[in-house]
Image: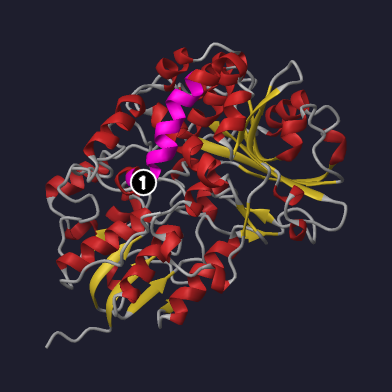
Amino acid sequence: MDKRDFDAVVVGSGPNGLAAAIALQQSGLSVLLVEGKDTLGGGLRTAELTLPGFKHDICSAIHPMAAESPYFKTLPLAAHGLQFIAPPVAAAHPFDTGRAAALFTSLTETAEKLTVDEPAYRRLLEPLVRDWPQLAPAILGPLRIPRHPLVMARFGLDAVQSASALVKRFRTPEARGLWAGMAAHAIQPLSNPTTAAFGLVLMAVGHRGGWPLTQGGSQSMADALVSYFRSLGGQIETNFYVKSLEQLPSARAVLLDVTPRQLLQIAGHTFSPLYRWQLERYRYGMGVFKIDWALDGPIPFTAPECREAGTVHLGGTFEEIAAAEQQTSDGRHPDRPFILLAQQSLFDSTRAPAGKHTAWAYCHVPNGSRVDRTEAIENQVERFAPGFCERILARHTFDTAQMEEHNSNYIGGDINGGILDVTQLFTRPALRASPYRTSTKGIYLCSSSTPPGGGVHGMCGYHAARQALRDIFKQPAPPLSSN
């Protein structure tokens, strides 16, 4: 009889590592989860980075994909302390005119406020929002024949386009700017094919449940996942940084929540030459420069929609944002970068002392950049919120190297585990029948370097666990939510 210390070992406790560990433990296996840091969560961590009493999300802050994850929706996370908070405005996009476009949970309200672009917006989003339950498992999984091919084909015709091509459907600066901010979550030039997919998905999930944050900080999501895993009998070991398979206890399956660079270091000597060759050519994308602020009051945005939004996209017109993202991709640092900003304390009083506030923001930078973007980011905020800088009590910054030091998966500051362009969207990290299998039996990749890529949804981990359950344990995976 094959006697091992554990049935499975999962390396890394980000949302994908936690999802993989839970799915395996749900199936009756004995699972050990190991984490290199002293706290669990990967990108789901919260800390007092600036002043005492000010809680800042170190990486992930707003969680539209978590709330709509087909796997996370099956887990009793509320019973383990997780509480989502949906701001009145999911995302706002201000302009120099003092006006702003906004993504509301209500598709009707969003479309009506886009005036002459209301019909175009409805034609684009209504089918996607309606069909999301059928689309989600296919969009948030590996490339395969979809269960609903006609529905997927309708989405695919739009999603395969570049954001720059699709924006031609809109006439007003407001609709075009709103679209630019959504598509810029792709972290690549908006002229690239498939960048439309990012904007479409984020808008669709926003119209189904908003763009929520988690009460108490993103750490509370990690804590809920950890609590549920432990309630199933799962075991955890922290301060266990894995550099080699030989460090791990014996197990029938090892699942690694790492990117190809670490995978090669840990297990590359066991891989076939072809698989190693593919991993060595894996490409990482733009990095981020991030700021957290402790504030003496809320950000004084001119546009009222921004004062009700959990997320604010700062960058102006479509043309301005597209130019900034292209310059960054080309290795430059634009004077007016595109900014993603979150203001969690407006909706969660646990984030700051009474009467005070926090804010979180980042801009894209060339991979590995050490350039300090503090002034450029704060100038962009001040542009749409005059008087903002006067409210800053303290700030904390991360450049790309510091982001990678915090989380070794953020290679060069890339928070998506590799660029999500058309060549790596579904074939990440290598072109294989299953992207989760490595060339070595029993070793699997479960990070955002596999489909569907970055974001807090746990689906990379779920699908990797599903593959391991089929291959090694001859068991089905826990079912997904159909809602």
Q: Nearer the viewer, residue 338 or 159?
A: 159
Q: Which residue is rendered at x = 71% and y = 55% of the image?
A: 49
Q: Which residue is rendered at x = 67% and y = 46% of the image?
A: 87
Label tally: 1
Residue 337 location in percent, x, y?
61, 25
Q: Is residue 122 magenta?
A: yes
> Is residue 235 left or right of 9 when viewed as pictured?
right
Q: Which residue is rendered at x = 80% and y = 49% of the image?
A: 357
Q: Is residue 66 above or below residue 88?
A: below
Q: Is residue 465 magenta?
A: no
Q: Which residue is mark 1?
A: 136
Q: Nearer the viewer, residue 472 or 128?
A: 128
Q: Is residue 267 visible?
A: yes
> Which stretch did the figure color magenta?
120-134
Mark 1 residue element: helix
Q: Which residue is rendered at x = 39% and y = 55% of the image?
A: 70
- Quarter of the image with the N terminus in it: bottom left
Q: Main secondary structure of the magenta part?
A: helix
Density class for disc 1 (Cα within 10 Å; few <14, some 14-19, many ≥20) is some
Q: Nearer the viewer, residue 437 or 98?
A: 98
In the image, what residue type sits under mark 1?
Ala
Q: Is residue 189 visible?
A: no
- Quarter of the image with the C terminus in it: bottom left
Residue 188 location in percent, x, y?
44, 28
Residue 243 location in percent, x, y?
35, 63
Residue 20 location in percent, x, y?
35, 65
> Is residue 177 left or right of 18 when viewed as pictured?
right
Which quadrant would residue 360 be assigned to in this image? top right
Color scheme of the displayed model: secondary structure
